[in-house]
Image (tube, rainbow, N blue to C red):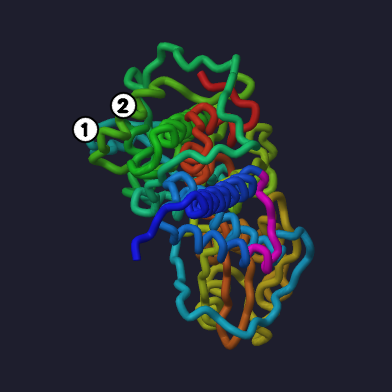
Amino acid sequence: MKKVFTLKRVIILLCLVLVYTAALNYIRVLASSTVLNDITFDSDSASALSDEVDEEIETESLTEEVAEVAKYYDSQIQKAAIDSYEIFAPVTTEVTAVTTVSETTEVVTTTAPPETSATTAGTTVQTTTAATTTTVTTTTEATTTEEDVEVDEDEDVDIEDEAEESSGNLLLSSVSSTSSYSSDNLNNGKSYKNETLTIYDSSSGRYVTDNAFDIVCQVTYAEIGASMEEETIKAQAVAVYTYIKYYEAKGEYASVSLKSNVPDKIIECVEAVDGLAMYYDGEYILASFCAATAGVTCSSANVWGGERAYLQSVVSEFDFLDTDNYGRVTTYTVEELRKKIESKTNITLSDNYENWIQILSYTDGGYVGNIAIDGHTTATVSGTERTLTAYVFRTYILSIRSTCFTVSYSNGVFTFVTYGYGHGVGLSQEGANLYAIYAGYTFDQILHHYYTGITIA
């Protein structure tokens, strides 16, 4: 029987199209509203809404734009689920037993930053760089103190392998897409190429003297690789140069890592910011940086005990999207943890395992402050009597990625869940890259965000 398109059929068809279009717009508006307002859902509503988004994503007709928003929205749901545990609440806690331990966890082994004094007196140091081989004679004494160890060895990693390419720009209402820093002079006419720097290359254990431009390129490449956004690389380059100059102004050598065979992308980005540095009250700032944070940076006062006006705690809005470092699980058996603690301190642990690690306080951003190890709040660590803070614990005793962590014990295994990677002070490399991707930040906006009240010139 031949079908005839009557007026009634046409009206029904148009109604179906309108309902379907309205449904798509509803999903888009709802997802966008969540991104803009960073709504935290309870577990039931988050789960239900996640199911709705999943069903819509499966529809072939979704536009790429809506799919991108839905993808970001899913990550917000994951964040809400983590936040529902209130793990960052600043209250005194104790280790509690858990019933299960993840079978797919891994132990991360890192090296604590050096706490030594390095001296060169009339010695000839031969150095090899990507472009040249240089022989220099140095007679300067360089000293590294505990307070000034800002770049952890375990943060000198090539993030190129970990960084993921992202598409699209999701602008949040809380993020400004424009900047105006009247005190900046981004065209100062200076050049790194007209300067020579000496640094301590922690990757080779040598002092290296070379053209400042080449050193900035190699350190930047060693720090973040070449896969990150160009504005992120530019910001890192300015931070690297400033960090080195800060120590030079003190008569010391910055401890950084070099990586040769620098790709063109890094060189071009350094060219774009050539000659720029960061200042506070006319002096180079301690431009510390870390791989990632727990969503908030730490003030220098709460990590090293030295108050610096430009190293305050600020929000790093997108770090929770860094799945490699946000919610990372590391496990130690009783034997492994005992060996770590007793070999690095003067503490002899009891057999009361659940008393071994206690969190006593928190600092800004939910990072752990003071801890107790089997009842001890101080200990001899690396030959020095120290208060047992999370920074001391992470840096000198145990190889976990961040001082923002939870800890639990069950069936002979300690489970640490960490958020972020590194000391958390200053620029977050992953956070900066995500600001460039999702908020369109330029390098100077990134630097002004992470370093409070600075001037770029």
Left or right of 218, for residue 183: right
Q: Residue furthest top?
A: 189
Secondary structure state at the residue bearing disc 2: strand
Residue lying at 38% horizontally and 54% vertically, measured from the top left? 162
Residue 267 position, x and y percent, is: 30, 30
Q: Which quadrant, please, contains the N terminus? A: bottom left
Residue lying at 51% horizontally and 32% vertically, measured from the top left? 441
Q: Is residue 223 above or below residue 282?
A: below
Say which residue label 2 marks: 211
- Closest to the observer, 29 or 258: 29
Left or right of 450, for residue 130: left
Alpha carbon separation for disc pair 2 and 1: 10 Å
Residue type at tag 1: Ala
What's the magenta region?
37-46
Q: Are marks 2 and 1 in contact (CB under 8 Å)?
A: yes
- Closest to the observer, 59 or 296: 59
Say which residue label 1 marks: 131
Residue lying at 49% horizontally and 49% vertically, measured from the top left? 7
Mark 2 crowdedness (10 Å alpha carbons): few <14, some 14-19, many ≥20: some
The answer to if 59 sits in the magenta stretch is no
Mark 1 crowdedness (10 Å alpha carbons): few <14, some 14-19, many ≥20: few
Residue type at tag 2: Asn
